[in-house]
Image (spheres, helix red, strand yellow):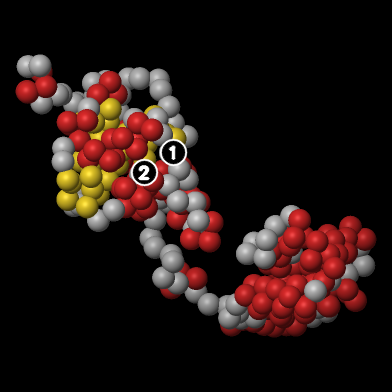
Amino acid sequence: MKETIQVIIDTLRGYRGESLYLTWYLLAVFYLFFSEKEKQKRLLFLYVPLTVLLLFVFPPTAYVVIHTVMDNEIFYRQLWLLPCAATVCYAVCHAVLNAKYGVWKVLVCAAGILVMMAGGSNVFRNGNYTPAQNPQHLPQAAINVCDEILNDDVEYMVVAAFPLSLIEYTRQYTAEIVSPYGRPVIIDKWHAHHALYDAIESPVLNAEELAALARADRTECIVVHSMKQMDGNMEDYSFYRVATVDGYDIYMEEWLAERHNGFTFPDDKGQE
């Protein structure tokens, strides 16, 4: 139980971060508890969220959740159920509407805005945020690679293996391309190693190994970084490079490459 209490404390600290929004939320709840009279709004902003919060910080229930529903790595997601932003905004609006004089309404509104601004930080200055390259908010290279893979007249769900830099984005962009492995291979704690993924991420690519592993996983398409050295030729194992897109080489099995728009087999293949 002591370990569970420590998980609760660490999770609350991590959820709070460097901002004061959790503090503002608790103050808003305290204010609404004494000032809000409507039962439906008390239920929405007070009773239900506080029940969730109490279940979160109560060690016995937290222990059950951590050990039967989710591990301590994602335990913090329970806090997503708290309507923090909505409660703070509603509390400010409630205070403004209940101020008796116009000057007080303006002052309360201005103070609420300043408090919220001072309590946080500009998220767009965070290194994890970058300007969107397209309406999908995905790297344009991932979209271009997927579009090139699907550039044929075949109604077929292609199984394609991608390097680390594309795995998370291709599955968000289209459901017409299936990967033989998924996000678990890039999460160290899950230890979901995959031989084909390891071969694609290898500093030096081995054509024979890639082709053999791909066929073992029923994978018709392999995408690799074009800058990497290739030991051997993929064409010797009936995988043909149909295109190079944004620094990625796209190899397809012979039957699929034959149907790829804009691709023609090398002359020596045509003479066989």
Could you tell me residue 90's position as x and y percent?
Answer: 75, 67
Residue at 34%, 38% in the rendered image? 213
Residue at 75%, 67% in the rendered image? 87
In the image: residue 77, left or right of residue 65: left
Q: Which of pointers 1 and 2 lies earlier in the amino acid sequence?
A: 1
Reading the image, the residue beneath label 2 is 196
Judging from the image, what secondary structure is the residue with disc 1 in?
A: loop
Residue at 45%, 72% in the rendered image? 126
Could you tell me residue 80's position as x and y percent?
Answer: 69, 62
Judging from the image, what secondary structure is the residue with disc 2 in?
A: helix
Reading the image, the residue beneath label 1 is 180
Q: Quadrant of residue 14?
A: bottom right
Q: Vertically, is 79 above or below 138?
A: below
Q: Depth check: 186 or 109 in front?
A: 186
Q: Vertically, is 225 above or below 77?
A: above
Could you tell me residue 180's position as x and y percent?
Answer: 44, 38
Q: Depth check: 106 or 131 in front?
A: 131
Q: Quadrant of the N terminus?
A: bottom right
Tag 1–tag 2 contact (CB < 8 Å): yes
Residue at 36%, 43% in the rendered image? 196
Q: Depth check: 205 or 255 in front?
A: 205
Q: Amino acid at mark 1?
A: Pro
Q: Quadrant of residue 272?
A: top left
In the image: residue 27, left or right of residue 271: right
Q: Amino acid at mark 2?
A: Leu
Mark 1 is surrounded, within 10 Å at the Cα level, by few (under 14), some (14 to 19) or many (20 or more) other residues, namely some
- Is residue 117 at all visible to an observer of this figure? no
Question: Which label sits on residue 160?
Answer: none
Q: Quadrant of residue 269?
A: top left
Q: Depth check: 258 or 101 in front?
A: 258
Query: Which tag is nearer the camera, tag 1 or tag 2?
Result: 2
C-alpha separation, residue under disc 1 versus residue under disc 2: 9 Å
